[in-house]
Image (spheres, rainbow, N blue to C red):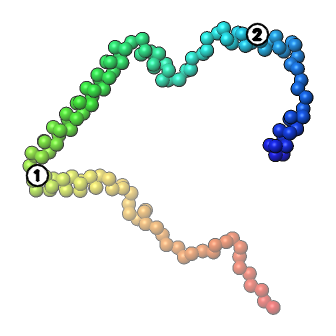
Amino acid sequence: MKTDDFEKRLAHQPLRQIPAAWRGDILRTAQAAVSKPAPRSSSCFHSLSSLFWPHPKAWAGLAAAWLLIVALHFYNVDSAVTVTKNSPPPSPEFFLALKQQRRELAKLVEPATAPDADRLKSFPPGPRSERRAEQLTV
């Protein structure tokens, strides 16, 4: 059914009056809703803002803490760059020790099973189905 057809059928429908018993009930419910304050939303942001709203000093303290964290972060980055620029290159002994540590780690990480257990046994490929091949002679 198209929207235009529905609207035409709806326009030809006679309007009916609301029953009197319903009218009183609807008006009482509306009056009760108007007299009560609207319920507050229970979102996380709303609960946090209601917690901090009466305390602007708490907001100022929170902002100061974030500024201090950001300032310390940038201060540490600058000092780390200067330390790495001034450090001498690693010695050949360091690279030898590193290579030895990697060999020891490789020995510890190797699997404890025998290599024969890991080797795959090779079998000739078998038939791909369970059906047996039958030969018909005529």
Q: Quadrant of residue 57?
A: top left
Point out residue 34 in the picture as x, y percentages from the top left corner: 67, 11
Judge from the rendering whether residue 82 lies leftward or rightward of residue 103; answer left or right.
left
Q: Report the side of 53 relative to 9 (left or right).
A: left
- Residue 7: which disc? none
Tag 2–tag 1 contact (CB < 8 Å): no
Where is residue 42 drawn, in percent x and y? 55, 20
Q: Residue at x 91, y 29 (%)?
A: 14
Q: Residue at x 39, y 12 (%)?
A: 55
Identity of the residue furthest to the bottom in this view? 138
N-terminal-most mark, 2 or 1:
2
Residue 138: % across, % down:
81, 91
Q: Is residue 134 left or right of residue 116?
A: right
Q: Between residue 86 and residue 55, name the one nearer to us.
A: 55
Residue labelled with disc 1: 89
**Residue 76 at x, y percent in the picture:** 20, 35
Q: Disc count in the image?
A: 2
**Front disc: 2 or 1:** 2
Q: Secondary structure at mark 1?
A: loop
Q: Look at label 1 and name its amino acid.
A: Pro
Which quarter of the picture shows residue 10?
A: top right
Which amino acid type is marked by label 2? Answer: Arg
Give the labeled residue for mark 2: 28
Between 131 and 90, the residue placed more toward the observer is 90
Q: Is residue 76 above or below residue 62?
A: below
**Which image quadrant: the N terminus?**
top right
